[in-house]
Image: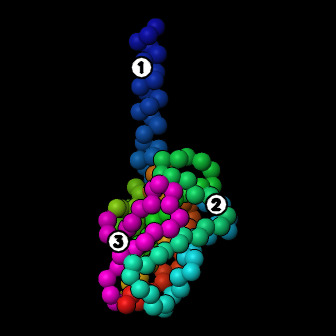
Amino acid sequence: MIFRSAMTAALLSALAVPVLAEGHRTPAPEGAMVYFIGLEDGQTVSAPVMVNFGLSGMGVAPAGTEKENTGHHHILVNRAPFGEMDGDEEAMSDGLPADDMHRHFGGGQTEVMLDLGPGQHTLQLVLGDAFHVPHDPPIVSEQITITVE
């Protein structure tokens, strides 16, 4: 009897993993938006740059938290707008990468001080679900360009 229960549990666990691996996307509520607060396209700023994340129509929750209508922030830095770069299709199913161009705020942070060098920089926000996967449809801000003095 114990063997049968253990086998059943193992089978159910094995069946649950492919659902996530095959590109599970969390639905986004209609009208949800992510945006920058106090930072505008074309603005000239000093380093370090304070970036505040705005979100409407949803709540913020740390990565790993599976709660309806929540997500956590990511900033895309100095790259093509989301959806226009090789690898974005993969990010839509497997999650956003973590590197200098894709910065994760999985602790549920709503602001960050970015240390950007002098010159022009592009920034875009993307909301990710519990697994860093963009929602369906993706919740992204407009890409902005700022100049750091």
- Separation of residues labelled 1 and 3 (CA atoms): 43 Å
Residue type, mark 1 in image: Met
Q: Which residues are magenta?
A: 99-119
Q: Position of residue 26 (x, y in %)?
A: 55, 54
Residue type, mark 3 in image: Met
Q: Residue at x 44, y 31 (%)?
A: 13
| Residue 7's disc number | 1
| Residue 58's disc number | 2
Crowding at dot 2, Cα within 10 Å, few <14 / some 14-19 / many 20+, comes out as some
In the displayed structure, would residue 132 be above or below residue 102?
A: above
**N-term mark: 2 or 3:** 2
**N-term mark: 1 or 2:** 1
Crowding at dot 3, Cα within 10 Å, few <14 / some 14-19 / many 20+, comes out as some
Q: Are marks 1 and 3 in contact (CB under 8 Å)?
A: no
**SS for callout 1:** helix
Residue receiving disc 3: 101
Q: Position of residue 12 (x, y in %)?
A: 47, 29
Residue type, mark 2 in image: Met
**SS for callout 3:** loop
In the displayed structure, would residue 25 be above or below residue 146?
A: above
Q: Residue at x 56, y 67 (%)?
A: 139
Horizontally, residue 75 falls left or right of residue 71, namely left
**N-term mark: 1 or 3:** 1
Q: Residue at x 39, y 66 (%)?
A: 103
Q: Could you tell me if residue 126 is visible in this image?
A: no
- Separation of residues labelled 1 and 2 (CA atoms): 39 Å
Q: Residue at x 40, y 55 (%)?
A: 94
**SS for callout 2:** loop
Does the segment drawn in magenta span residue 109? yes
Query: Which image quarter is the C terminus in?
Result: bottom left
- Separation of residues labelled 2 and 3 (CA atoms): 25 Å
In the displayed structure, would residue 37 be above or below residue 130?
A: below
